[in-house]
Amino acid sequence: MSLVPPQPTHHPASAVDRAADQLRRSIFDGQLASGTPLREIPLADTLGVGRSTVREALTVLVAEGLAVHRPHRGVSVGTPDPDTVHDLCLARSVLESSGARRWADADPAARDAVRRCLDRYAEAVERGASYFRLNERHLALHLSFVALTGSPRLIAMAASVQAELKLALAQVDRMRRNPHDQLDDHRRLVAAIEAGDADAATRAVEGHLTDAEAAILESLAL
């Protein structure tokens, strides 16, 4: 059975979906930094929707881990916790290196998916896409590494880890990294995986993700 990273399913967006999407983009593009209060009335005015719509959209962001709700203080943009960041990066390393080791034995469709994801990431960088879009393409590439395992469960686990780490990754990419340098790093990483040396591929993935963790913690002053 051929496995490739799951693609989003598109359904007509509700007002809540649209409001949540606008808030996500504002977070990922740096308009709403970690810790920023998300107050219903100003947001309703900015988004041109009712307070009830904003309230539901904020509930969605809290469920996704992009925002936090504190009693008597309301909702604010989430702030990554250092222990959580470390644990999530460890999980990424285990999952992605497992896929990288399987390159030589992986389904050809899964290998093609890695190359397509790299091309899509490169396209976004070259046309100066928003950080929201860059983050999507970046994470899709990393998820394609896990898909080399051929395991739906491991792919689902990796997607869950990515969802928890998305806020931290988006912020560090925005704050400290040049998208073209990032692209070059990922081209080298994919080349190391494609070479088919399982041990070398594992070292490349682990090194890449160790550097990513250090950059996250440094940039977010954690």
Image (cartoon, rainbow, N blue to C red):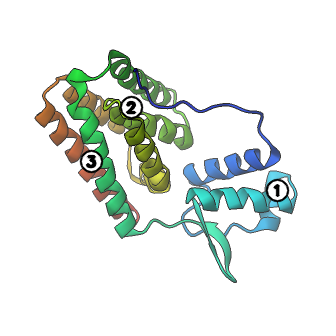
- Tell which of 134 and 113 is nearer to you: 113
Give the label on residue 144, or none. Answer: 2
Q: Are marks 2 and 1 in contact (CB under 8 Å)?
A: no
Q: Mark 1 or mark 3, which is nearer to you?
A: 3
User: At which x and y percent is residue 57?
Assistant: 73, 56
Q: Is residue 34 above or below residue 126?
A: below
Q: CA distance from mark 1 to mark 3?
A: 39 Å
Q: Which mark is residue 94?
A: 3
Looking at the image, can residue 174 be seen? no
Q: Residue 135 at what x, y percent from top left?
A: 48, 42
Residue 156 to residue 104: above or below: below
x and y, in percent, of residue 148 in the image = 32, 29
Residue at 78 percent across and 50 percent down: it is 16
Q: Residue at x 55, y 43 (%)?
A: 132
**Residue at image location 39% in from the left, 65% down from the top:** 84
Which residue is tagged 1? 53
Callout 2 environment at 10 Å: few (<14), some (14 to 19), or many (20+)? many
Mark 1: which amino acid? Thr
- Badge 3 crowding class, 10 Å Cα cut-off, few under 14, some 14 to 19, many 20 or more, is some
Which residue type carries mark 2? Ser
